[in-house]
Amino acid sequence: MIKPHGAEELSPLFVYDTEKHHALNAEAETLPSLLVSSAAAANAVMLGAGYFTPLKGYMNLADSLAVAKDLCTTDGLFWPVPIVNLSKDAQGITAGQRIALRDPNVDGNPVLAIMDVEAVETVSAEQIDFMAENIFGTLDDKHPGVQTFKAQGNIMLSGPIQVLNFSYFQADFPDTFRTAVEIRNEIAERGWEKVVAFQTRNPMHRAHEELCRMAMEDLGTDGILIHMLLGQLKPGDIPAHVRDASIRKMVEVYFPKNTVMITGYGFDMLYAGPREAVLHALFRQNCGCTHLIVGRDHAGVGDYYGGFDAQTIFDEKVPAGAMDIEIYRADHTAYSKKLDKVVMMRDAPDHGKEDFVLLSGTKVREMLGNGIAPPPEFSRPEVAKILMEYYQIEDAKA
């Protein structure tokens, strides 16, 4: 199987040993506490689950600035996005302490991890802006990723962590949330060698479904990992439980058995476009995938990124040999009325816009809210039914 990034084997930071876990939970009650941001909590979950192998904890300021600038830590590890614990108020916390990190997303703020604080650094406004602009390609406060990043605070705590729970993800998504360890194990059990991953934060329409099929056929893979983000999204995005239900229904009806793994991971969406595409590739390698589908405007939002920036970054900023996973470069896919099937637009040079079934997100939302299923060329009826029910309930609340 493909090796994890920068390591011979995965290094999940979750404490699996029962006795040690119990002892650390007891110790946590005696330690100073820090209520972390949702972004820092998500980083802890990803570190705990092995997705961020080979990192041992949160990055310090020097590494964060180096990663933001050059996609590389100060000791030479290739990494696309700073993995940080930024806080507005870390009063009384000093280097050398052990502290309990508490979860902002679960009632009662249970202990998420124990941290050995190696440094507590004040980050200047200029440094925050430098990182944000490099990560997101903009400083526009309307960009949801920029907003979130700049709102976390300017006190950076760095050091290794021991993770004690996976926040709300295991409880809320018991059939879907999986660690990188569990995904690797399942790939091995299935005997898959070549595996392509599909990243999604949305329900999958017909074009997404066919894109997965195209990638599997073109690459000759044994299977596909449909790997959905389960964490925080921007307002208006469809919640994870609705996405999960619609994707499961689509796979059940339209894919051959034992060709698809439906899983999810506990991370908040960054909306960082190209940088996030590289992060997506890196942690899919840690899952055991050999390929990642990178489509048009992958992980983008609004008009902040060019349609194929998330592909060209792999040519322009990812050094040869930095990662073992390969990307499958996809164009926008849509149903061709001429050919009576879903195609990549680049493969249909003789088509005009009128030859495709193209619907805007706003139009689809309006149709679903009114109980009207989009055409079957756009959305499978079984998927549309789940989404219509969701939107009609939402509209009734409004």
Image (cartoon, helix red, strand yellow):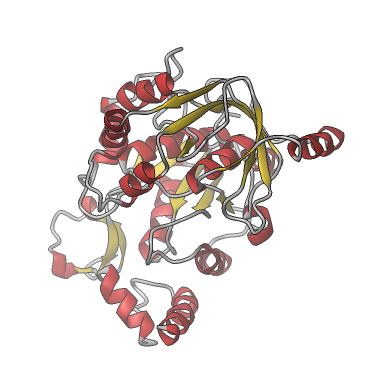
Where is the C terminus found, in terms of image quarters?
Answer: bottom left
Q: Nearer the viewer, residue 331 or 26?
A: 26
Percent from the top left, x then y, of residue 81?
40, 32
Instruction: Using the rendered view, name the quadrant where residue 312 is placed.
Output: top left
Q: Quadrant of the N terminus?
A: top right
- Residue located farthest toward the top when viewing the structure as drawn: 75
Residue 364 visible in rendering? yes
Instruction: Locate residue 363, reporting x and y percent.
Output: 26, 76
Q: Is residue 3 visible?
A: no
Q: Residue at x 34, y 25 (%)?
A: 318
Query: Considering depth in this image, is 229 or 326 the residue closer to the camera?
Result: 229
Q: Residue furthest front?
A: 92
Compared across the picture, whether 373 is left or right of 120 comes to left
Q: Tell me what residue is drawn at x 64 percent, y 37 percent.
A: 48
Above or below: residue 397 compared with residue 387 = below
Q: Which sits in the foreground, 315 or 105?
A: 105
Numbered disc total: 0
Image quadrant of residue 185? Answer: top right
Give left or right: position of 137 versus 267.
left
- Is 371 placed above or below 117 here? below
* Residue 108 point in image, percent of width and height: 67, 56
In the displayed structure image, the side of residue 111 where residue 19 appears, left or right: right
Q: Position of residue 314 (x, y in %)?
A: 32, 30
Q: 189 or 105, which is in the foreground?
A: 105
Residue drawn at x 27%, y 34% is 129
Q: Dividing the picture into quarters, in which one does residue 349 lie? A: bottom left
